[in-house]
Image (cartoon, rainbow, N blue to C red):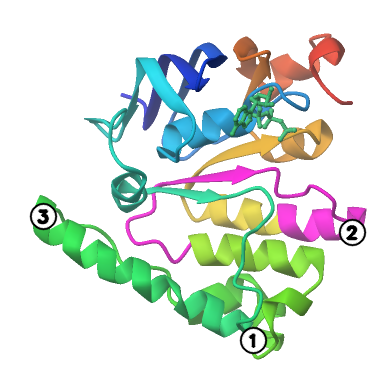
Amino acid sequence: MSLLEVDDIHSYYGPSHILRGVTMEIEEGEVATLLGRNGAGKTTTVRSIAGTEPPEIRSGAVRFDGNDITDWPADDIAMGGIGVVPEGRRLFTELTVEENLEMSKITRGKWNTFRRRSNGGGSATMEIDELYELFPRLEERKGQKSGTLSGGEQQMLSIARTLRLPNLKLLMLDEPTEGLAPQIVQTVSESIRRISDQGLTVLLIEQNVREAMKLADRGFVLDQGEIVYQGTVEELENEDLDEYLVV
Ligand code: ATP
């Protein structure tokens, strides 16, 4: 059984039919990438999996770690182990780096409630010290307001904050290298590689095909709300997919 199974989902924003039968499977421990041009439906796919509204799934199913999570509320999906690093970072800009990391204590409160309700187990959150090991730059800047960090540092903080989620099993990153200078793209990519080396399953959403190919084991190409190609990265490299991708 795959960790994540997206089975023929159709997602809508009101009357707009955006995802038109998306099917994907992601295996435990792999780095998968979802590629596609602007407006292809990548963010809509992420939101559909994570249960973030809008959009609304009107048919099909999402299964994760043995559960049908199609109709689960977003908080329960997060507590069940799916973390999202959203496009645009969404930090508490007036708070410091460390305060942003501390904010996930709120999430921890929700986690305790969830655990009581579900009688579930679950692993511990990644501690702030461990995150500083992964992102030394954040430790250097722990007292700085996050709104004054560089774009790359903000992206690292956004990733680090999601890694505080308890029970995390799948990390979805929505265009983490967007708008970053090439050198910073390398730093962010390197952190994603290290996170995956620690055993976390990753779904990387990218327009930056070259960067995604360097990290991923397998890729899916989305166009106009449909998966038009899937294969290993080696297979993708040998296909002529230019019409669907920014290369
Ligand atoms: P990008 O790379 O530009 O972020 P994307 O592949 O992530 O693109 P989506 O953001 O999923 O694309 O958008 C897919 C389609 O859904 C687009 O046509 C977009 O205009 C539409 N859409 C996105 N959000 C909404 C919304 N809240 N309400 C209505 N339509 C939306």
Q: Residue at x 12, y 51 (%)?
A: 118
Q: Secondary structure at mark 1?
A: loop
Image quadrant, ligand 1: top right
Measured from the top left, where is residue 163 in percent x and y?
Answer: 48, 62
Density class for disc 2 (Cα within 10 Å; few <14, some 14-19, many ≥20) is: few
Q: Residue at x 71, y 67 (%)?
A: 154
Density class for disc 3 (Cα within 10 Å; few <14, some 14-19, many ≥20) is: few
Precedes in sequence: disc 3 or disc 1: 3
| Distance (Cα) linking label 2 and label 3 | 45 Å
Picture layout, residue 180 above or below residue 244? below
The amino acid type, in three-letter code, at marker 1 is: Lys
* Figure quadrant of the C terminus: top right
Q: Which residues are magenta?
A: 163-189
> Position of 5 compared to 135: left or right?
left
The amino acid type, in three-letter code, at marker 2 is: Gln
Picture layout, residue 19 above or below residue 13? above
Measured from the top left, where is residue 162 in percent x and y?
Answer: 50, 60
Q: Residue at x 65, y 36 (%)?
A: 205
Precedes in sequence: disc 2 or disc 1: 1
Residue of label 1? 142
Residue 117 marker: 3
Density class for disc 1 (Cα within 10 Å; few <14, some 14-19, many ≥20) is: some
Residue 127 is a magenta residue: no
Q: Nearer the viewer, residue 76 or 245?
A: 76
Q: Nearer the viewer, residue 201 or 223?
A: 223
Q: Residue at x 43, y 76 (%)?
A: 127
Picture layout, residue 245 above or below residue 210? above
Residue of label 2? 183
